[in-house]
Each structure stands twice: as structure tokens, then as C-alpha cells.
Amino acid sequence: MPGPISLRKVASGLLLAAISIYLLRALWDNGTGAKLIRQYRAGLNTELGNADWGLMGQWVNQTAIWAKQLLDYYPHLDGQDLTAALTARYRYLEGADSIYIPWEREKVRSHRQFPMTGIVICAGSKNYDLAAHLVAGLRKTHQSTIPIEIAYAGKEDLRSEHRDFLQDLDSNISFIDLLESFPNARDDLVNSGWAMKPFAMLASKSRRTILVDADAIFLMPPDRIFEEHQGLVQSGTLLYHDRATLAGGNEGLIFLQEQLALTGRPPSKLFSNESLYFTGDSTFEADSGLVAMDKTRPEVFLSLSFTAWLNTKDVRDSVTYKRFHGDKETFWISFELSGIEYFIDPRMREKSTEN
């Protein structure tokens, strides 16, 4: 009688699963689970320097495992130990109480009042007109209804008259002063240019965030990109290639290979099999004119936090911008070094030798 036997096996499996969950919670309740978490956290407190990117990637990889364990087995906890470890590693997060954190129950609840998906644009008084053109194109040409946030670094960066001008374009526009979102990162953000972009993604109220340069032009509405782009659906990330050209030395590639070796992991298949940068046939890999990330996934949120660290003033001045052209490569490098899946759209790239 295979039917009844199969049902009994299923019932037994469900019972074992229930017992396992009960025992895990019992471990936590009697203090054993808390002790394990404290030991795990202590193992992640090693001091790292500005050039220790590979070791930082290992830290993100292990912290992502911690976050997954927390969400899978201890969903009733608020994850404050994990947040404390993250803030201790990335000091720019000190006082950043308004940003979404996927394992903090209160943050998850409070952000449900905001749209799930939205666009964030970094704009200042020097390029607010470009941002206005982008907004008009989205609303009038593509009939897009996606919420739009404008991020800037202080009132001198985007003056009030220019904020008013942008606000008058559409009622579904809001503003983020990054100096208020990250009170401990003023030196990182004031007059930072490109560097503020990952911070803007972190500060966005939308959990699924599309970062767009102010001078971007859309050929189709982006409203359903998280549902319709398979690479984004699978990985929670989407980037696009920059032009493939040789326009400098290979110092960045050599440094990245050294850092990858420190992780103890081989390069991802995406990097080793599909990258012209990896083979030395292009100085550039990805562009950051449009980046989409699903911050509800802890591994994506943590890798984005790593990206922001790569763009903090000390790190960018001493390492990042000396080896790479601005912020754009940092969005995928953080994922690559952390062993976290990411996706770069393979279309529309041709190899060129023009400078």
C-alpha cells in the first residue's frame, strides 16, 4: 500500500521539522543560541584596513550567512546583534536609523508604508535640469507612475529653489538629504559626487531600488523591471556593461585578482567566463547609470553596504579611485569579492580598442 506509507513518511517529516524548529528555539531560549551568536559575532570583529577588500568580502559572505540563519531559524528576534556588528564594521551607518534593514522587524514593519519599488536620482543644483528632463520623460513619455526620490548631500548641494522646481514637476516626488540619513558620514558625502550613489540606494525608502543617473534616458518604462527582468528576479541585482575599451593600465585588475585570492574562492562564472575586464580586453566592466537592487535580500543589502564603504572618503581617496574610474565598478566588485550572486546584462556590448 504505497499511498499510506508515503503519507506516513510525509507526516513523519513534518513532525521532525516541527521538533527541529522547537529545539532551535529552545536552544535560543535557554541561552545556548545567544552564546553561539555572540561567538560568531566575535569572530567577525577583526580589524580591516582600507585596502583589505578581499577580507572585507569574506566578512560580508559570513555575515550574510549569519543573516540568513537569523531569518530562517530565529524570525522572532530583532537582529540587533547583527546590526551592531554591521555598524561596528561600517561607521558611516552610526545614527542611520531611518534606513531599511531586512532583518530588523521594526524596520521591516515601518517601511511597509512606503512603495515597494522606486527610483532614486542623485541631483544637485549643478544638474537639477537634467533630473527634471529625466522626470518629465518618465512621466510624460512613458506614463510611468513609479515613485521618484531625489537624493542630495545638504542644502547647499541642492538649493531650495531647485528642490521646489523639481517638486512642482510631479506630486509623486520626494527628497532625501543624505546628510540627515547618515549623520556620521558628513565627510564621506559633502562634495562627494559619484560617491554618494550607493548611499542614496541605502537611504531610499523603497526596498526594491532603482538608482538612475540624472542624465539617463529611458527607452521603456521601468515600473515592472523587478518582475520582468529574469536576471534581476534571480539575483536581486541588475547592472549594465560600460563601453568595452582600453583606456588605461591594468592596475585595477591586478589588485582585484590579489583580493580575490585572499577570499579563498575562485572568481564567479560571470566574471571569469563573460567578462572582458577579466581577460584584459577592456578597462571597464560595468556602468552605474542604472543599478537595480532588491534590499529585502540580506546578502544584497550587505553587499550594497560594502559598496558604500568602498566609496567612503578614506577608502576612495586611498584605494578605490586610484585604481578604478569612480564608483561604477564598486557595485559589482563588492558582490564578486563577497561570493554573492549578481547580474550584469550581457546585451549591447562590443569590444573596441578606441580610447
Image (spheres, rainbow, N blue to C red):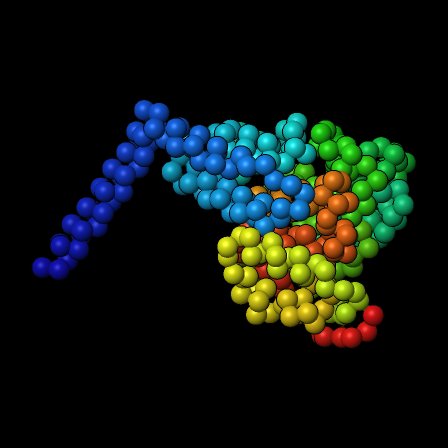
Q: Is residue 143 above or below residue 20?
A: below
**Quadrant showing the C terminus:** bottom right
For the residue pair 25 and 42, the one nearer the viewer reads as 42
Give residue 192's position: percent from left, percent from top.
Answer: 80, 42
Q: Position of residue 118 (x, y in %)?
A: 66, 46
Q: Residue at x 65, y 38 (%)?
A: 205
Q: Position of residue 332 (x, y in %)?
A: 63, 55
Quarter the N terminus occupies: bottom left
Give the residue drawn at x 46%, y 40%: 66
**What residue is shown at x 64% (from left), y 66% (from top)?**
278
Q: Is residue 11 left or right of residue 28?
A: left
- Identify the residue shown where x is 18% and y is 51%: 9
Task: Tell me which corner region of the image, top left, top right, bottom left or bottom right, holds residue 219.
Answer: bottom right
Q: Nearer the viewer, residue 134 or 89?
A: 89
Name which quarter of the figure residue 37 lies in.
top left
Residue 1 visible here: yes
Q: Nearer the viewer, residue 2 or 184?
A: 184
- 146 and 7: which one is in front? 7
Q: Position of residue 344 (x, y in %)?
A: 62, 62
On screen, 277 above or below 133? below
Q: Is residue 78 above or below residue 191?
A: above
Q: How many marks on residues? A: 0
Task: Tell me if residue 281 comes above or below residue 118 in the rendering.
Answer: below
Q: Is residue 140 left or right of residue 112?
A: right
Q: Is residue 274 left or right of residue 14?
A: right
* Name of the residue lying farthest toward the top: 30
Q: Can the viewer see residue 340 in this picture?
A: no
Residue that sits furthest to the left in the current view? 1
